[in-house]
Image (cartoon, rainbow, N blue to C red):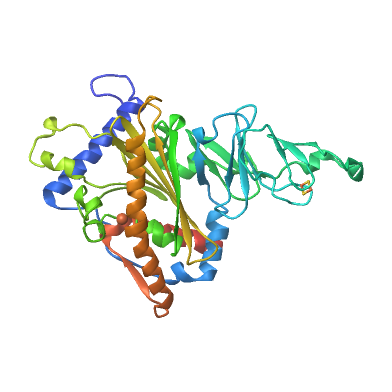
Amino acid sequence: MSNPGTDSPETGIERQQRIARGIQRRLVEHIRNASTDLNPGPARNDAATYTSQDWYEREQQQVFTRLPLLVGMSRDLPEPGSKLLFEAAGPSIVVVRTQQGLIKAYLNMCTHRAAQLVTQCTTAKRMTCGFHGWTFDLDGDLIAQPGGKRGFDGIDKAQFRLIEVPAEEWHGLIFVIARPGTRDDIDVASFLGGFAPELAQMGFERANPIKATRLDVAANWKYAYDTYGEGYHFSTLHPTTIARTAHNDMVVHDKFGLHARINFPYRDQDAYADKPEDQWTPRPYGGVHLLFPNTVINVSSMGPGQVFSIYRIFPDGGPHQAFSLMAAYRSGEVADDVDIKPWEEFHDFIMNVVATEDYSVSASGQRNLRYAPEGFLLTYGANEGVLQDFHRHLAEIIGQGG
Ligand code: FES
Ligand SMILES: [Fe+2]
């Protein structure tokens, strides 16, 4: 792609602006016509995918311990020795930044007798097991066995390295695959496919954490995740909150293989419906970025800069319970001394809406699914295309695993 009338290639920023303008055109078009993006027709899905223990276990094996999962952003691990515990996908995993500044991850398990190694995330350069004191460096090497060393004469320390987990820091996003493996076993760019250029451009490298909240929900993780993928429920479920600012049942839906981006028309675009495009104020790039299988990155602009809201939904021990890790980050272009209160308030507002409106429907719906007759099918409308695609992709992956 090059600029019209010049030979210079399009810069990342120009590309993002072009995409933002394309989205804005489609949003205004939907407002003009009271239309929305649609999949070809309705689709149905067996309730057992939300309720069965067997399906839950297959998801654990085929999805949550096999695909790259977002565990945080670069500035969550700002310096050598920084650590992050990730236990949501099953195994306890410790993610570290090494002396060289690289991201590595290990099973959070001492190689002596498997005790949990890191229980508190300090910035110490060594990790010492609380059971017998075996000590490891940030590269996973066993570097000390204080006391009792005589009991281990002749062991080859190289065989007692921490067990590595595939981890990759990619344009400010940190992913792991929650099972043993090496750096060669993870390839975030190819996992993201056509979505990679969009996400690489976001400036996640410089995003600073603001606030994080955990929300528990008595529902299958997918019932919770589904609520982020459609705006068809705005006016009925969110009449006094989201529906005040966003149109109901209108969406711009872009597909990137397993992943998707959606944008909802906010009422600030209404004024452009009867104006020519050269009179519009350009809408900044944004949207709800859905990273398969369980992550939402909502990019929005407010006050002095962008906010990245990252919501990750995990099953919690079975098909009927889940939790969300919800975190807000402000973009790096925002000066350090800016009052972050507006972002905190935005985060709290979303937490409140999700907990009291979305997840309360997820929980009561899940309860109904438990007692629904066998073979009950949920229906996703053509206007709920994200949900259709998500459940189809999941079924394809689970099906392949047998
Ligand atoms: S289990 Fe860690 S030192 Fe013994
Ligand atoms: Fe909602």
Name the residue rendered at 36%, 48% in the picture.
260
**Residue 42 screen position, x and y as percent:** 28, 65
What percent of the width, then of the height, locates residue 166? 61, 43
Q: Would residue 118 appear left or right of 204 to someone viewing this image?
A: right
- In the rendered image, which quarter is residue 282 located in? top left
* Image location (x, y in percent) of residue 134: 78, 41
The image quadrant where one finds the N terminus is: top left
Farthest-out residue, bottom: 373
Judged from the image, the quadrant occupied by ligand 2 is bottom left
- Does residue 224 sit above or below 175 in this rendering? below
Q: Residue sitting at 40 percent across and 80 percent down?
A: 373
Q: Residue at x 30, y 25 (%)?
A: 2
Q: Is residue 228 visible?
A: no
Q: How many marks?
A: 0
Query: Where is residue 236, by image quadrant?
Result: bottom left
Instruction: State left or right for residue 126 relative to residue 265.
Output: right
Percent position of residue 227, x then y: 34, 57
Residue 223 appears in the rendering:
yes
Asked if residue 78 lies left or right of residue 30, the reply is right
Assign the C terminus to one quadrant of the image.
Answer: bottom right
Is 21 situated above or below 56?
Answer: above
Is 330 above or below relative to 49?
A: above
Is 103 positioned to the left or the right of 270 in the image? right
Asked if 93 appears above or below 124 in the picture, the reply is below
Name the residue: 28% across, 31% down: 17
